[in-house]
Amino acid sequence: MNALILVALTALAASGSKPAASTEGVGGGRILLAPKVGFFKSTAPLGGDLYLGLELGYVTPLLKRRLAVVMEVNYHRPQASGVLTDSQLGGFGAPPPDGSYTLAVREVAFLLSAVFRFERALGSLTPYVGGGPGLYLHRATSDLFGATASESGGGLGLQALAGLELPLGPGGLFLETHYHLAPLDFVTTGDVNVGGFLAGGLGYRLRL
Amino acid sequence: MRLQVVATALLALGGCSRTTEGPSPAVERVVNPRTRVSTLTQLCNAQGGQTGWSLEVEGKRFTPVPGEALTDTPTVELPQVTLRGPSTYTLSRSQVFYVRPELLLLNVPTRDTTPPVELQPGTYSVEVANPLGGTGTLPDALTVVPPPALTRVVPPADGYSATGANPIVLEGRDFQPGTSPIIFLRREGVADQPLFFVTVVSTTRIESEIPPGTPEGIYDLVLTQPEGCAAVAVGGVDVAYPHLGTLTLTPRSGSELSNTPIRIFNAPTGAQRGFTDVPELFVLAPLKTEPTLSQRIPLRAVTRVSATEVTAEFPSCSGFEEPGGDPKCPQGLAPGGPYALEVIDPSGAVGLVPASEGFTVVAEPTVTLTSEEGARPVPLSGALLP
């Protein structure tokens, strides 16, 4: 939670240091602000889950103002469940306890992307692609034999995105898809990529 | 700008450090299931078969977690148990069993297991660490002891006696004063013979008694400590009693339907002994009620006539019962034989009338006479030996 506050402060500081940029940009301001929601499915054996994100971007003057730098914060908490059997449960003639478990992996990611926008390349639609590094903060919480335990940590990863934006009002309605490479090596999870696909994200991007 | 750099660095550092949260275990008691009621938990550092000795760890909040649950081979991550004392040993996963949050079972290896692990004798604390939680420790939870060793079994000073207790002394090392080891005599083909009245005098001396009536022979003496380790004195006990002379009896047969008065003669030579008082006499024979089981049945009305002669009543009809019951003698000895007799003199000397010279119980034959009135059984006496 402290990390989240720290990042929010960082983002605010970054946006606050460039007040003049809001008056420039293609078709509006150069600051982009976009809430988004979607469905995320990890490539690890975790269930799908609701994906919430908030994007803050800046349209640079580079490449004819088609290159934007975007910082996104997102959150999702998929979980897995199953039944564990092991010869070390019970033993000495004692019946083994019920090995049903759940494992929830909460992820808060800070993604820094370079996004190239093909302004109105498809009639009024603007396709865009991008990618960049991400800082992925994970908290895995397990529940087994009635006891709950958790482990937390973070690491760097990579992500790529593609989207299509339809101008609407002061901004644009967009559809977006992501792929995340987010390695994780916890006791409870094992060494896996808990990233995966944002199967579909919907959002609205304001130009300020 | 400087603020951003510092903030980002702090974020990266905080985010990448791994932290865990979970129930912290408490270790309350360690129990050797072989000595469950004992307040002092001991563990032997030898023997224990293939896997070692079992221990129970009682406490609270022992918390396994799923392990590698997002891989193809999910497992259970168990609490880790470490014994700390004169030596330190952390049990492997295969040596720890989880039963419930309050109970773990351990297989503690010894120098004789595969692979061998020799814990040095002394007092150990037991530490349990949950995979994602804290650590619980119970100081002085366990005492590791070496196995006993037997070097000699000292027989009774006056030799063994068949009629009284035979005090023996076990000499060796690493005995445990204040405990109650189990001692028994072992001989192939014979049921183990436990010894009672065991006193551990010191770490090198145990006093005990071989009970009266123990059959003669060479026995292994097995000493088993309460925590499980044992020592064996192979052929360490040679039970041999003084002997009566050659014993003969007359008559050597009698009817199954009546007890038979007999005379037993003793012809001692050399160190052999005569009858000093009224001896105990037994016949080794089956009863009609259990014809396949040979039993040790006392003879009745034993009287000493002289040092070389006794008289008695052979219980062909009465068996273990009082005489004078059912005339068909259903509780009597099974017809057959000859049966051997044992003789135990009050002096502790023993003698045997071997089966080849023993007593035969003769069945009452029935023959069928045929007459005009039909078949009718007529009892006839069997042929009796002189």
Image: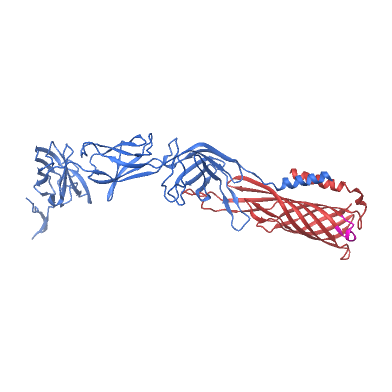
Chain colours: A red, B blue
Location of residue A193 in the rendering, given as x and y in whole percent from the top left corner: 68, 57
For the point 53% across and 37% down, the residue is B138
Judged left or right of residue B16, residue B300 is: left
Height in image: B139 above or below B75? Answer: above
Location of residue B268 in the rendering, given as x and y in whole percent from the top left corner: 10, 42
Judged left or right of residue B262, residue A71 is: right
For the residue pair A152 and B342, the one nearer the viewer reads as A152
Task: Examine the structure image and report whether residue A197 is included in the region drawn in magenta.
Answer: no
Judged left or right of residue A44, residue B285 is: left
Location of residue A113 in the rendering, given as x and y in whole percent from the top left corner: 80, 56
In the figure, residue B158 lies in which quadrant?
top left
For the point 69% across and 46% down, the residue is B17
Task: Examine the structure image and report whether residue A65 is included in the region drawn in magenta.
Answer: yes
Judged left or right of residue A72, residue A42 is: left
Farthest residue in the left direction?
B386
In the figure, residue B166 lies in which quadrant?
top left
Span of residues in magenta: A59-67
Location of residue B44 in the rendering, given as x and y in whole percent from the top left corner: 43, 42
For the residue pair A105 and B138, the one nearer the viewer reads as B138
For the residue pair B274 and A147, the one nearer the viewer reads as B274
Height in image: A65 above or below B161? Answer: below
Instruction: Tally the marks.
Output: 0
For the point 92% across and 58% down, the residue is A27
